[in-house]
Image (cartoon, rainbow, N blue to C red):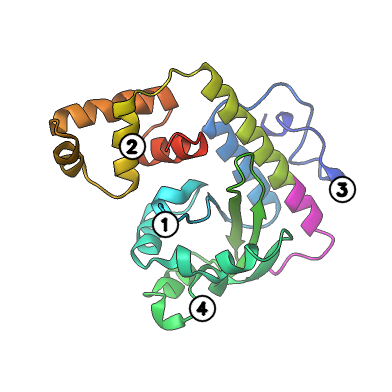
Amino acid sequence: MINDMLPPLPGGNSNAAGDSKGAIQTDYEILRLLRQVTGEAGFSHFMVARPPSTDVQRFQDRLVLSNWPTELVRQYDQANAFVASQVLARVRQTRLPVYGDAALLLPAERSQDCGLHGVLRGLKIETVFAVMMPSADDQGFIITLAGSRAYPEPEEVPGIYFSLLQIMDRYERAIASRAVSSEKLSMREIECLRWAAAGKSSDEIAIILGISAYTVSSYFKTAMRKLGAVNRMQAIARAIRLKLL
């Protein structure tokens, strides 16, 4: 059961908790827990992302876990909404949770939302709860819960916050555990991931490194296997978390 994976939470929120029968080992288990906590809090959508960095600002490259529809992720990225979003600005100013209407996910200048407000409305996203969570590498995680419920009551906020905090703590420990036992990336694999993080295609990376596109693809496959990633984007995100890029 999902609620067997976390110890009891402060505030008596036992629905998302249970006894500790072992550490979380997979992203799928994290996703199940996030879905549970999101649903029990009365929301429908969750998103976990790294804050934009100087080198990596694309939303898809910073996204860690979410149940956002693929089309919403794509449109959000195309509009460059993450970097300019109100939620990013607000969570960077405080360690406390913030909440407001769906406009929090959009740029302050509505003319820049590229129709995203209508997309969010179609998904019944009317309310957003967000917090900046600490991380071992000091980059932090931005977590948002969104849906059609009313703003959380003050007494609800600590329970939601600590549920998310415990999940991310388990997530980081699982990542660290996998990193210790995983094979080391080769210099070529790191170079391919680094150029991919900079937005280069396989063909462009092949030209830069003076190798074939087929060889570049092979390096990506072995890097993904070593990092336990299912695609390039996830491999890049994990390599960044492990400070390999």
- Compare residues 206 and 121 and report the one nearer the observer: 206
Identify the mark at residue 57; answer none if there is no mark: 1
Circle 3 crowding by C-alpha within 10 Å: few under 14, some 14–19, many from 20: few
Q: Is residue 103 left or right of residue 194?
A: right
Comparing labels 3 and 2, the label whose residue is closer to the camera: 2
Q: How many marks?
A: 4
Q: Which residue is mark 3?
A: 11
Q: Specify start and end residues of the magenta stretch as a single range.
A: 150-162
User: Mark 3 vs mark 4: which is more N-terminal?
Assistant: 3
Residue 235 lies in the magenta stretch:
no
Q: Which residue is mark 2?
A: 193
Quote the CA–CA distance across marks 4 and 2: 33 Å
Q: Residue at x 22, y 45 (%)?
A: 201
Q: Which quarter of the picture shows residue 218?
A: top left
User: Mark 4 vs mark 2: which is more N-terminal?
Assistant: 4
Q: Is residue 117 left or right of residue 13?
A: left
Circle 2 crowding by C-alpha within 10 Å: few under 14, some 14–19, many from 20: many
User: Mark 3 vs mark 2: which is more N-terminal?
Assistant: 3
Circle 4: element type: loop
Q: Is 7 rendered above or below residue 66? A: above
Residue 155 lies in the magenta stretch:
yes
- Kindly give the residue lying farthest to the right in the view shown: 11
